[in-house]
Amino acid sequence: MIVRTTQEITGTERDIEAENGNWRSKRIVLGGDKVGFSFHETTIKAGSVNEFHYANHVEAVWLVEGEGTLTDRETGEVYPLGPGSMYLLNGHERHTVKADTQMVMLCVFNPPVVGNETHDENGVYPLVTVGT
């Protein structure tokens, strides 16, 4: 059994902030926990526009706080986001998240991230695996 709080993660190597200061990810479950997925609480700064592309991961996102939009950069389709919204990037879609207000999201990644990944110039996390 694993029990963790976001409070105990704050300020540790599991608490990652974007270089541009637009978002912060508290990585609650990581690849090293060996459960087949990672689980994060991500906070996106109000007024920010963020481009992402998870070429190596499937991501599910549940928005618990805030409002904004999700744009599928492949199709141009724009989706409103608010508390209770979920989106699943099962096709590795390039996407943009615009936060009208501060947004708090719960995110699941498969395969799991190991914790030290950062987005490259294309918004992609590299595929890093945990040894056995």
Image (tube, rainbow, N blue to C red):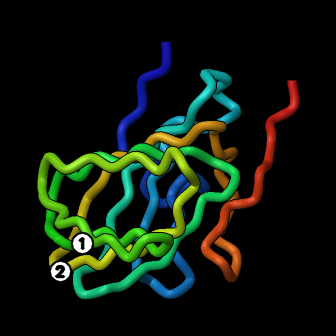
Q: Which label lies toward us, 1 or 2?
A: 1
Residue 7 makes an appearance in the image? no
- Who's the residue at 49% across and 12% down the image? 1
Does dot 2 land on a helix, a strand or a loop? loop
The image quadrant that residue 10 belongs to is bottom left
The image quadrant that residue 54 belongs to is bottom right
Q: Which of the image's four quarters has the C terminus? A: top right
Instruction: Pick the residue in front: 78 or 54.
Output: 78
- Who's the residue at 40% across and 46% down the image? 88
In the picture, measured across the screen, residue 125 lies left or right of residue 67, that is: right
Against 30, residue 43 (above or below) is below
Question: Going by the picture, which residue comes out furthest to the top?
Answer: 1
Instruction: Pick the residue in front: 121 or 26.
Output: 121
Residue 59 makes an appearance in the image? yes
In the picture, measured across the screen, residue 19 lies left or right of residue 87, that is: right
Q: Which mark is residue 81?
A: none
Q: Could you tell me how far apart the alpha carbons at marks 1 and 2 are, in whole angstroms? A: 8 Å
The image quadrant that residue 22 belongs to is bottom left
Q: Pointer 1: what residue? A: 69
Instruction: Pick the residue in front: 32 or 72.
Output: 72
On the image, the x and y values in percent for residue 21 come to 44, 83
Contact? badges 1 and 2 (CB < 8 Å)? yes
Q: Crowding at label 2, few (<14), some or many (≥20) Cα neighbours within 10 Å?
A: some
Q: Crowding at label 1, few (<14), some or many (≥20) Cα neighbours within 10 Å?
A: some
On the image, the x and y values in percent for residue 52 come to 52, 70
